[in-house]
Image (cartoon, rainbow, N blue to C red):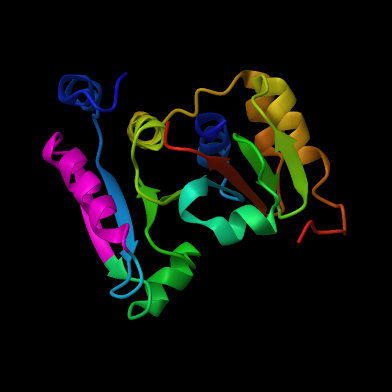
Amino acid sequence: MDARNPLDLEAALADVSAPVKLVFFTQTFGCDSCLPARQALDRLASLSDQITVEEFNLVLDKAEATAYGIQRAPAIAVVGGSDTGIRFYGVPDGYELVSLVESILLVASGVSGLSDESHAVVAAVTEPVDIQVFVTPT
Amino acid sequence: MVNLAQRLAFASPHITAAAVAAVEYPDLVRQYRVTGVPKTVVNERTEILGALPEADFVSQVLADTNDPEPLA
């Protein structure tokens, strides 16, 4: 999928078969990338009736920021029937936009896609595990 | 690695997985000494450089969660 190609994005999101909410955290000052991040989410939402965007202010909406464990903006939590623990920090562009679309498809599908072996290992986890993957846009 | 990490998060209520745009968070890049991508940091202490097959990634992500020494 080429995230810069509108047809590729539209085709990918045509498969979204269940509601997915993109919970977006912005802040009013000192966040040049918050507006382009919100615009990217609006673009995705325009391509599927199943995708909605809910916006909170990182500073003003402390309860929501705490509930989602968000400490920076722009941030996106990908939520299905419940919170999935999937987060994005920064403008979803290039590689990160592709990853965001893939996460939407993952959440909508309801299936992790992990091997049986991996799934068994992950299902046995009982302590908090916080994974951060640093990426670049291209 | 982002997609795989997020599959783990999706499969477990105890796991969170964040993709961090390195260029937008230079403070985190310094804090976690990110010199190349993808770089994965688990519980602020375990580092995984580059891409790994699923089984290896799962093993490394969950292997050292009891290490008492954080990176930062």
> Residue A7, how many percent across, how many down?
16, 20
Point 70% across, 47% down: residue: B42
* Segment colored magenta: A32-55
- B6 in relation to A90, above or below: above
Q: Does B51 lie within the magenta span?
A: no
Residue B13 visible in the shown view: yes
> Residue B56, how many percent across, how many down?
74, 24
Residue A85 visible in the shown view: no
Point 41% across, 31% down: residue: A95
Point 49% across, 29% down: residue: A112
> Residue B62, how many percent across, how many down?
75, 39
Report the quarter where the C terminus of chain B lies. Answer: bottom right
Count of number-bearing discs: 0
Point 32% across, 71% down: residue: A27
Residue B23 located left or right of residue A11: right
The part of the image, by quadrant, that contains residue B28 is bottom right
- A135 in relation to A113, above or below: below
Report the quarter where the N terminus of chain B lies. Answer: top right
**Residue in front for this viewpoint, A100 or B38:** B38
- A44 in relation to B23, above or below: above
Residue B3 located left or right of residue B46: left
**Residue in front for this viewpoint, A2 or B58:** A2
> Residue A40, how many percent across, how many down?
23, 45
The residue at the far right in this view is: B68
